Image (spheres, rainbow, N blue to C red):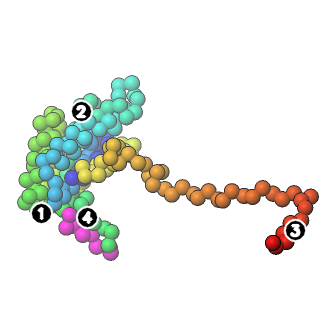
Amino acid sequence: MRAVVQRVASASVTVDEQVISKISRGLMVLVGIGTDDTAADIESLSNKILSLRVFSDASDAMWKASVKDIGGEVLCVSQFTLMANTSKGNKPDFHRAMGTEASRQLYSVFLEKMRQLYVPDRIQDGQFGAMMNVSLTNEGPVTFTLDTRKFEYITSASTSSTSIDKVKKPVKPASKAPPISQKSEPIVPSEGP
């Protein structure tokens, strides 16, 4: 699963010129579901979103508080385009996105998990599969990308080598011969046996 998480002062979703969801201060979350995503991905992503420290605490120290800590709201919108492969050509390829019905069910489970982990009425939703207009005021701006299959923010023991380790170190030049002094005697070839 992938999510784009934005810290917002406010956000709303409009469908057919009707505002169907809106929040004040909190997080706007776009969620993409891949073909191989499972309940484990839901568990990981929902916990990460609700625990991510992107707000200031009471003493105004930045990166100290989560959306739960500040009593904020969360607006989630299903976004299959997050799973697009754009590496070839100019037309996005959506084969990595889960099919509509399976995705609808998994997204529903994701929303339920978010509500179980927090205050249910503080988790809002767009309208799955609809053409939505999403408006938001990004505060900062502060935006994060989360991916349950990449864990860019976690260093594991098996992948402890850093990118610096992977960079080839320059080859040391061969040691230079000591400089010949100008007063050195000429080399005279030795006579044969």
Would residue 85 be found to the left or right of residue 173 on screen? left
Measured Cα–Cα span from mark 1 to mark 3: 86 Å
Mark closer to the chain start, 2 or 3? 2
User: Residue 86 appears in which quarter of the rendering?
Assistant: bottom left
Q: Position of residue 4 (x, y in %)?
A: 28, 51
N-term mark: 1 or 3? 1
**Disc 2 target residue:** 68
Disc 4 residue type? Answer: Ala
Using a 10 Å C-alpha cutoff, classify the residue at mark 4 as few (fewer than 14 neighbours), some (14 to 19) or many (20 or more): some
Is 107 in front, or is 161? 161
The residue that mark 3 highlights is 188
The residue range painted magenta reads 89-96
Distance of label 2 from label 3 (alpha carbons): 87 Å
**Mark 2: which amino acid?**
Lys
The reply to whether residue 141 is in sight is yes
48 falls in the magenta region: no
Q: Position of residue 70 (x, y in %)?
A: 27, 30
Q: What's the residue type where badge 1 is placed?
A: Gly
The span from disc 4 to disc 2 (Cα, nearest Å) is 31 Å
View extreme (top): residue: 59
Q: Which of the marked residues, 3 or 4, is nearer the chain's N terminus? A: 4
* Residue labelled with disc 1: 99
- Check if residue 95 falls in the magenta segment: yes
- Specify whether residue 25 is in view: no
Residue located at (18% from left, 58% from top): 34
Please state which amino acid type lies under the numbered disc 3.
Answer: Val
Residue 27 vertical placement versus 103 (above, below): above
Please name the residue that numbered disc 4 is placed on. Answer: 84
